[in-house]
Image: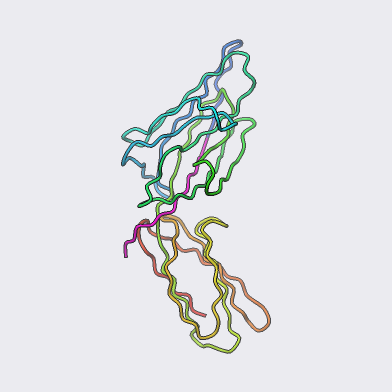
Amino acid sequence: MKNPFLVLGVFLSITNCAPEKTINHPEPTLVNGYLMVLGTNDTIRDRPYKIALLRNSRRKVYDETYTDDNGYFELEHISEEGDNPVVYELRFDDHIPDETFTGEIAVFVDTLAPNSGVSQLRPGSYKGRGGFSSGFQSWANVTLEKRAWLELEVENIDPQLGDQIRIKFVSHRAGTGSWEHTFYHGQHWKIILPGVGNVENILEYSVKIEDGFVPKTERILLGEMDTTYFKLEY
């Protein structure tokens, strides 16, 4: 069952190598990489996408470019002599197609550059950024999340008075796209929930046993741009 919704997320995986320093000669900051689909090695090349290199104030753009026919991009900035140390941000700065990706963004930065930070952004923030210091060459693959859906069926196969099951669907990272519901004895439900393709999505649930709840977790791999069926019996 195909269905066009979407969930997106942007991840930056950055590896740095420091160039040899020359006294009184500013070192260039170089960033290159690919725009890719999360969970696969596929590059995104349906059209050019804009990516920018900014200062940590998020106001001044030092360089910006568009991905080429292979989804590849390069950015560069040379600091002026006497500049204070600069922390740059890499930002996905373009429209995300709603028919295949979500507007929800997350950024994860892994870098060896000094004074670098790790950022995780929430919806409504800049569309993807990662902090790293000037004077380094960095590789940064930017990944977007493909849409997918979970068709969830919940059935109590032997209903007893007082039966309960609490369910939470949190996509592939905690707190993102979460859906929660409590089902009681005798209830039989079917529902379609948006998730993320090509990765394991997390379904947390707790079944009431006597006076307490027993927590359990299911990890469900969803195919991109498709609906995956899963039945939960208790």
**Colouring method of the image:** rainbow
x then y, percent, for residue 74: 42, 28
Q: Nearer the viewer, residue 126 or 83?
A: 126
Residue 86 part of the magenta segment: no
Residue drawn at the location 31% of the way across and 34% of the way down:
69
x then y, percent, for residue 205: 56, 71
Q: Nearer the viewer, residue 65 or 227?
A: 65
Q: Nearer the viewer, residue 224 or 16?
A: 224
Please indicate whether residue 40 sits to the left or right of residue 57 in the image.
left
Residue drawn at the location 57% of the way across and 12% of the way down:
25
Position of 227 relative to 89 (above/below) = below
Tell me which secondary structure the magenta stretch mostly adopts.
loop
Position of 109 relative to 222 (above/below) = above
Residue at the extreme top: 24
Tally the numbered discs.
Answer: 0
Write the start and end of the magenta stretch as one range: 1-14
Residue 8 part of the magenta segment: yes
Using the rendered view, name the quadrant where residue 134 is placed.
top right
x then y, percent, for residue 55: 56, 28
Residue at the extreme right: 211
x then y, percent, for residue 96: 40, 45
Q: Nearer the viewer, residue 171 or 180?
A: 180
The quadrant of the image that shows the N terminus is bottom left
Residue drawn at the location 55% of the way across and 48% of the way down:
122
Position of 184 relative to 192 (above/below) = below
